[in-house]
Amino acid sequence: MVPQALQALVSAEVIVGYKTYLELIPDLLEGKRVFASGMRKELERCQTAIDYALRGRRVAIISSGDAGIYGMAGLVFDLCHERDLLISSPAAEAGQAVDFSVEVIPGVAALNAAASLVGAPLMHDFAAISLSDHLTPWEVIEKRIAAAASADFVLAVYNPRSKTRPHLLAKAQKILLEHRTPDTPVAIVRAATRTGQWTCLTTLANMPLEEVDMQSILLVGNSKTYLWKGWMITPRGYLQKYQVKSCWLKKRYGRCRPMPEPGPDKCL
Amino acid sequence: MVPQALQALVSAEVIVGYKTYLELIPDLLEGKRVFASGMRKELERCQTAIDYALRGRRVAIISSGDAGIYGMAGLVFDLCHERDLLISSPAAEAGQAVDFSVEVIPGVAALNAAASLVGAPLMHDFAAISLSDHLTPWEVIEKRIAAAASADFVLAVYNPRSKTRPHLLAKAQKILLEHRTPDTPVAIVRAATRTGQWTCLTTLANMPLEEVDMQSILLVGNSKTYLWKGWMITPRGYLQKYQVKSCWLKKRYGRCRPMPEPGPDKCL
């Protein structure tokens, strides 16, 4: 959690959030008015937060990861827009008549956290796609998977496998296999940075689909991504550009030879 | 900065980084061995960090934003791979013979930070693309822009306009305009969360190209993104799904009518 988010929670009078997320921060809820609700109650939570804000309360609405990436920030704005409220940012000029001000505090999104646990898979152009067809037609999702796969993006797949639509992941895998080789590296990261964290490095053809759930994120490599000794790495292109070859490096350094003291090595 | 990153810097003996970034954290460098270098010296910095680590030093290598997104994490792994080093994660089983262990600490990437400053533009599927053709052929970049635009991804454009290739942004704009309407919302965010921070909400056709530099990130909306009173918002689809209409909300709430005390409103 970034310090700014902690600060916002400490200074809030009202905290609104998904029940499971609020249970992760019991200490921060003490002495606050708390409104918790379950899955698919997003609209209710945001309305509640807005209504408290309209009554002059300092409200924090919680998302996991980054509120701006498949989180609650968008719905708060959508509702303010629909309700024709006047909202400003904390940085806006004083003196404006506003109903309240809104601040989005960026966070470490699930894709950032998942990637860090398995190495450096997102080092080149990537696309984030949610497989949930609850709010998006499946045809749109399919089109996006195909487009991202054909243009060799790394993919970060959110909401990969729900209990009610477990088959969508296999459909996505099939589309990906039309554009990528079967041995394309894939990381499955479940419950990143939480209790029960689990990571699995595998390949596009061999993904253990039944191990994937809604707490998981899938990272699908591009055509240059490789697996190496428990890590998943997408080259940015430096070594190719500078023609740094294994033999060159080995000749230059030996396997573990340290650089000479004291200065930096001029390797280019 | 996430607390984990601060902790890593505090406990490091050696800190390696791009000069401009190190200048942002002078207090954290006191008493450390510091290796700073300039642009295009990424390979040198990573080699230096690895060489110190091989000599048993605790090394922190700095990226801005998230080290795993267009940052230094990938190059460190690439070089360890090429040099055939044995590296483990801090969570790996003890007892393994390793040269050193590597930990990637995820951060708030530029796209997360930039999005938070202008509202909620990344609320639906999005693609991150770097316009730098220093390490990636322009043809690949063009293909990715077209694919992402045609599949209606929101776009986060990194390295949008360098001094040596200022014309690439106009080329990208032209490709985007083949797939998106001229009034597609665009945010330009320069120096997000730093001194000199500047944001501009505009449209795809009217982007002030000459205001964009390499410290900027562009956020290009999808077909549903809208600008509203100084904010840029991409709907996730809740309101459409639940058929929440302006008139319904206004009838239900009035413009600023607070919800009744004490309970949450059951709006669905």
Image: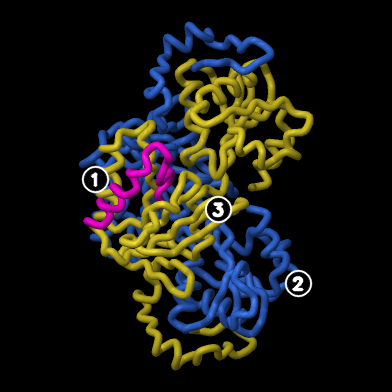
Chain colours: A yellow, B blue
| Location of mark 3 (residue) | A192
Query: Residue A102: x percent and y percent?
Result: 58, 29
Callout 2 amino acid = Gly
The residue closer to the viewer here, A3 or A231, is A231
The number of numbered discs placed on residues in the rendered structure image is 3
Q: Amino acid at mark 1?
A: Lys
- Residue with the mark numbered 2: B31
**For residue A163: magenta?**
yes
The residue range painted magenta reads: A156-178
Q: Give the residue type at disc 3.
A: Ala
Image position of A134 (left or right of A72): left
Find out whether the residues at labels 1 and 2 contact each other: C-beta distance under 8 Å.
no
For the C terminus of chain A, the image quarter is bottom left
Q: Secondary structure at mark 1?
A: helix
Q: Secondary structure at mark 3?
A: loop
- As drawn, A119 above or below B144: below
Whether residue A168 is situated above or below residue B3 in the rendered picture: above
Task: Farthest residue to the right: give it.
Answer: A31
Look at the picture and state if A247 lies above or below B170.
below
A256 left or right of B124 in image: right
Assess disc 2: are there few (<14), some (14-19) or many (≥20) residues with their C-alpha within 10 Å of its C-alpha.
few
